[in-house]
Amino acid sequence: MNSELLTVIDNLEREKGIDKEVLILAVEAALASASRKQLGHYSGLTFSVNRETGEIRAFAVKLVTEEVSDPSKEIGMDEAREINSDLNVGDECHVEIPPKSFGRIAAQTARQVVIQKIREAEREVIYKEFEGKQGDTVNGTVRRFEQGNVILDLGKTEAVLPSRERVPGEEFQIGFRLRGYILEVNKGDTPAQIVVSRTHPGLVRKLFELEVPEVYEGTIEIKAVAREPGERTKVAVDSLVENVDPVGACVGMRGSRIKNIVRELREEKVDIVPWDKDAPAFITNALSPAKVLAVKINEKDNTADVTVGDDQLSLAIGKKGQNVRLAARLTGWKINVRTGAQLRAGESAKELQNLPGVGMKLAWDLVQAGFNSVPGLASADVESLMGVPGVGKKTAEKLLKVAKEAE
């Protein structure tokens, strides 16, 4: 039995990485806890496991007295001095309890306490191994599903991929291998729990480090990542070494590197754009594949007015506004996209708004009706102006008057 105990402890040390001494101390504490009910009449009860043989011994603390009235708590002088010749009346003596006195000391209780102690020790080992790895990635195998969460087997422990960190539409099967980004390493009262994400932009950064040696070595720097998980990601890259093309290096020969990243992201589209310290240039790059004609920066309210060709508007905005939205996140600027025609219309509306009694809505209605300037408005007639929504005869006459005066 004793040798079997050491064998189990040695196996746990190898498999779980838990120090042997920690396990033996857990066994000793478990035996003391489980035996209190049966051997509680003893004082200062402790257990000791021999580190070499596995032999279990129990000791109680007894008071040395002239006359023994309670054998469980007291010991006579002569008997005490057989144990330690220096003891005197009133001293405490550690007395070994014969093995036969142990009886059946709630073996099941002892087993449960031992298991709990081992779990605590294992949790501590796992926590120390992973506590400094937040922001790193791990490979795991899908083991099971719990309330929408995916439980991954990492070998020594498990990780949880919460439903909130899963890419919409991404499905897994038992045994499927996947990579996750470590968000948290929790210690707590439960087994050390590693929380991973498949939606975090950091996952994209780590994939580039794994697939592109220049990124890992620091030759190429990832300046920013904007991501809509499962759909599209924009990555801004910059080269710290002259004559190294950051975009080309990330794409790889015939797209080999970016293909591996896209495959890991389950075919999520990835746009790689060159970073530029010049804001207008960076915004132009970020709106790729649309072709930008001009960028006007307003640093006061952190906005950028971007002008594109009439045929580029839908491309610049993207499906459901995705392209311009990602470009805004990537650059940190609020981006307003307009075509040349829209820009000219806006300037015309501002010009008309300078006329007395002409508000923003009326100015835009006039522009939409073809009255693009003050001279154009002044040369109109009452009947044509009455064709503008909300403009009656009196308003038309007033508009003509103020336009002619302004002209």
Image (cartoon, helix red, strand yellow):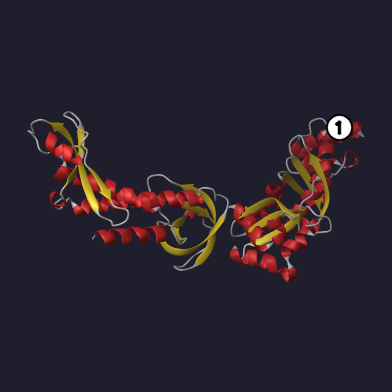
Residue, x 48% and y 49% (percent of image)? 128
Residue, x 59% and y 64% (percent of image)? 264
Classify residue 100 as left or right of residue 257.
left
Classify residue 40 as left or right of residue 219.
left
Give above or below for 147 relative to 79. Answer: below
> Viewer-proximal residue, 291 or 209?
209
Residue, x 73% and y 46% (percent of image)? 335
> Viewer-proximal residue, 392 or 233?
233
Q: Quadrant of the N terminus?
A: bottom left
Q: Quadrant of residue 146?
A: bottom left
Q: Quadrant of the C terminus?
A: top right
Classify residue 211 as left or right of residue 351.
left
**Amino acid type indicated by mark 1:** Val
Residue 148 at x, y percent in the picture: 43, 57
Q: Quadrant of residue 388?
A: top right
Residue 66 at x, y percent in the picture: 10, 30
Observer able to see residue 205:
yes
Residue at the bottom extreme of this rendering: 254
Residue bearing mark 1: 402
